[in-house]
Amino acid sequence: MDDLLRRALMLPPRASSAAAGLDHLHYVVLGCALAVALVLFGLLGWFVVRFRDRPGHARVRPGARSRRFEVGLAAVTLAVFVTLWIGGFAQLRAMRTPGPNALEVYVVAKQWMWSFVYPDGTAAEDELRVPVGQPVELLLTSRDVIHSFYVPAFRLKQDAVPGRMTSLAFTATEAGTYDILCAEYCGAGHSRMRGRVIALPAADYARWLVAHDAPDLARAGARLAHERGCLRCHDVRAVAPPLLGIYGRPVPLADGSTAIADAAYLTESLMDPAAKVHAGYAATMPSYLGQLSAADTAALVEYIREARP
Amino acid sequence: MTAAILTLAALLGSDAPDLDRASSGQPAIGLDEHVGAPLPLATPFVDSSGAAVTLAQYAGTKPIVLVLAYARCAMLCSVVLHATGDALAAGPLVPGRDYTPIVVSLDPRETPDEAARRQATLLERIGRPGDRAAWPYLVGTDANIHAVADALGFHYAWDPRTEQYAHPAAIFVLTPAGRVAEYLRGVQFPALDAAITRAGRGELTPSAARDLVACFHFDPALRRHGARIQLFFRLGAGAVFLGLASTVIGLLVWERRRRRRG
Amino acid sequence: MSEPTAPPPSFWTEPRGVRTWLATTDHKRIAILFFVGTALALMLGGTFALILRVELVVPDHGIVGAHAYDKLFTHHGIVMVWMFMIPAIPGVFGNFLVPLMIGANELAFPRLNRASFWVYATGACITLAALIGGGVDTGWTFYTPYSTTTPTAVAVVCVGVFVLGISSVMTGLNFIVTVHTRRAPSVPWMKLPLFVWTIYATSIILVLATPVLGLSLALVGADHVWHLGLFDPAAGGDPVLFQHLFWFYSHPAVYIMVLPAMGVVSEVVSTFAHNRPASYGGIVVATIGIALVGFFTWGHHMFVAGMSMFDTGMFGALSMFVAVFSAIKMFAWVITFYRGRVVLAAPVLYVFTFLFLFLFGGMTGVAVATSSLDVHWHDTYFIVAHFHFIMVGATLTAYLAALHYWFPKLTGRRYSEVWARRAAVAVALGFVGTFLPQFLLGNAGMPRRYYAYPEEWQWLHVASTCGAGLLALGLGTTLVYLGVALRRGPPSGDDPWQSRGFEWRTPSPPPAVAFSAPPVWERDAYSYEDEVP
Ligand code: HEM
Ligand SMILES: [Cu+2]
Ligand SMILES: [Cu+2]
């Protein structure tokens, strides 16, 4: 039944953990629309036939207006809509929360291709390989105009905005190859800006990683950290928070809140350091936006992740 | 391994046009070491009391510790200045007696007044409050500051977007004759005393490290244009409001008069 | 056919001469000028659309190249939104009917009204000049930083749309002042015809939102010319800020288009059901509610642009409130037929189409406002179908309903009812045929603004193009029989529909000066009670 509906509505096969929930909410909303349509147009049809102008049609005085009825009808409608919204919003929250130990992959969009950089330094163009069953978090940005990373089979999309890092969490559930489309108009090559996600069974993925002879990203990151002078400040407790062992830990922020030092936080700290300032330190860190390539950024983040005191 | 990363970096980030675009308008900043180069000692500056001075006045017998910084810097300058001050105060050498520390402001807009205020906090930090001769603070014209910076290989630039100078974080130790003896990079200078001693003997010491800490705040999304766009919309809204209000009132009055006449 | 009788003197002929038309300050003549302008825009925009649809029959490279395609959909959007849909109902029917419906001889500022038409014409010419001399390829949404970096004629189009916006503000201002100051003593606020209420609400949005569009486009134009980098992240700008500014206007703008359409529907439903609208008060509250709450939902266009969860939630929830106001109207229209005397004629057929498009357009709006579903649908053909149903379909069918309903009022003649019904059916089937497949394409994951697409979607595109052909046929037919009726239609009499509307209490077509003294109307515009024994 589920599959029949999915096909009838032309929805693509489902390949992510979010897809089934979305499709089911889709059916519910569609069901509501059809039910309302049936009732309203049924009534309309009946009124038009029953009260149409014809010889001998005798008019009857319409009943008195009832404010109770009107307000009640509006309230019920609102309740239905708000219920749908609560369902959708809860679903969105769940979709946006990356699973535990998510594999972080950097995605850089540009006219008109997708580049991916893995934590181990592997890079690929237009082809994203992910292990089935493992949560993945993509960190997206763009090098020119806005693009949007869209995988219909996952039912997911996220804009890649230049100068910003956005993120997209998913877990592939079915091995296979799925289209990546660009969903934000980006110029003449927009419709050809396509790529593929290849979801591999975990074992195949591991084999692919090994076969790929991944460069040691953390070492490259360590070298960069020296070259770029990161450690000039981050070695000195008085100037900047030490980097060793910070990964994955809660960071107290100047505004009183707390952030977890994950890849997204670290990337933001590199690109827009003033956005979240570590409590107790002055906002003296320079921004590396436009100075560090995506590969460099991935390497630095990997270095920080590996660095243990 | 590293080679792979480099190819990758080239692939993703550094192939010229795009990175240029991303960093376009970002000033070229850097530090070329000119160890042994003579400084233009005759360049005129003004000290914090407003008196005309030259660097030559401080040179001759004692080594010099030179810092290029500026008072309005929102970022690393104060960190560098304070670190220099702490290093100066910590060692056995006495500023003014064994060597002369000097600040030359990067910012030609800085006045002797501002210099005096900034100097006061520095003097306090090294425990010599009020003793202006202990750590002179000089201001000058753009051309003169550049003359000194160029001799040092210190490349900095004005960034109109952030209204800040982008510049490397480093300080310089000069021989008594006014040649560049040593570059100290970063924001901590534990080796300062040793460097001063070496410079006092006229030794030139190229540094081993080549890394660079930049004092530069690239200003991403919203920070800068946000305020301008907001102002534009405020003014625009005001203009629209005035325009509409005067149209309505003007036309109402005019129509009324026309009707009364006709 | 009976020999057409010489029409009685009316605004059409008094005074005579082309010059008197061009310099006219008569609201009825300005309405006709706006009709000519918006109808030309509809034909031009429709031609662009047909080329797009024909191109999409094949999965890749049909009759135009990719870059030409990008320009065509941009031109289609710009012409349809700013030259047709925004001015269509207020400019034509608002101008013609608002004074007649409130017992006034003219708008508050007749000269401002004349200026608003000529400013519209100027803006349209500037825009068209830019489209002909190079064109733009940004989409009608002008998203930065694409729009500030593309080498096409962005700046000139921004100027053109800016000027069109000035015309909108003039029109809106005039209606607001007119409704406040020119109502005859027998038309107090709560007796205003519902159409006037919607024009009033739309005018508020026009005056409040259009300047934001103007200022935003000014920034884009300036940035394009002088490379200020205002929205360019490499220069410290924020591209998403532009989206906020743009949608702060453009979301309310969809209500600029659809509110007057709702007003038309309220009038037509009441007249053809021969019944007082169910819940006049409810419709008025919903009208004003949409105009106000519509200002706080713009963020629902940016759910996947990197907005925080909190903002996403708020904008989604507020969108639901707007949807409730729309639902209230929907219920009221249907219930108005209850215990009425329903006359089926072309205008009411268009209203049925309107109700169908509005219900499914609205419910798909609710669907995207649930926010999680929008992650899949955003920027796909589903959205294209959604806004074509609710904004384009509703506006177009209401425009056609209005044109047929008030044709006798405007011209004093009748058109061929048989042909009108045929055309109405063709438009309905054509419209649904065009956009129903697009909902499915969106489900399948086809992004909008795609020149080339995977082959398995071809049959849906072919279906959609067939629908578009039928729609074009329906519209073309309308043009023909209405043209014939304009010259040779039999006289209609003053009130051919036996409506109680205020506008029908003057001769049809009205004389140049409709009221010699402020009219005294004892019964309101929906007083069908006397039909009930
Ligand atoms: C019933 C209440 C409505 C709701 C809850 C609603 C909701 C939405 C939402 C959430 C979107 C964003 C989808 C996306 O961009 O992915 C959207 C898009 C749109 N809606 Fe609605 N909508 C409603 C009614 C209307 C009406 C009445 C109109 C016009 C008269 C309209 C016109 C549009 C347009 C033009 C777009 C897309 C614009 C674009 O992406 O270019 N909507 N609507
Ligand atoms: Cu793209
Ligand atoms: Cu909207």
Image (spheres, coloured by chain):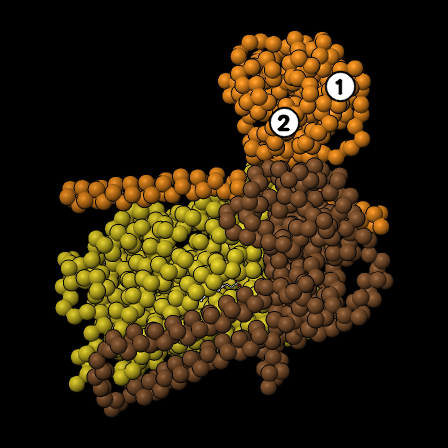
Chain colours: A brown, B orange, C yellow
Q: Position of residue B121 (x, y in %)?
A: 54, 24
| C496 sits left or right of C417 in the view | left
Query: Which SS class for mark 2?
Result: helix
Q: Which mark is residue B235?
A: none
Amino acid type of the residue tagged 1 in the rendering: Thr
Q: Is mark 2 within 8 Å of ligand 2?
A: no
Amino acid type of the residue tagged 2 in the rendering: Asp
Q: Residue at x 44, y 53 (%)?
A: C248
Disc 1 target residue = B197
Q: Residues within 10 Å of mark 1 (few under 14, many from 20)?
A: some
Q: Nearer the viewer, residue C357 or C65?
A: C357
Q: Residue at x 74, y 59 (%)?
A: A126
Q: Residue at x 31, y 50 (%)?
A: C173
Precedes in sequence: disc 1 or disc 2: 2
- Please identify the quadrant where the C terminus of chain B is shown: top left
Q: Position of residue C492 (x, y in %)?
A: 28, 72
Disc 2 target residue = B86
- State how far apart marks 1 and 2 are (Cα): 17 Å
Q: Residue at x 65, y 8 (%)?
A: B57
Q: Nearer the viewer, residue C515 or C326?
A: C326
Q: Position of residue C409 (x, y in %)?
A: 29, 66
Query: Which SS class for mark 1?
Result: helix
Both labels 1 and 2 in a single chain: yes
Q: Quadrant of residue B54?
A: top right
Q: Is residue C290 above or below residue C110?
A: below
Q: Position of residue C67 (x, y in %)?
A: 65, 55
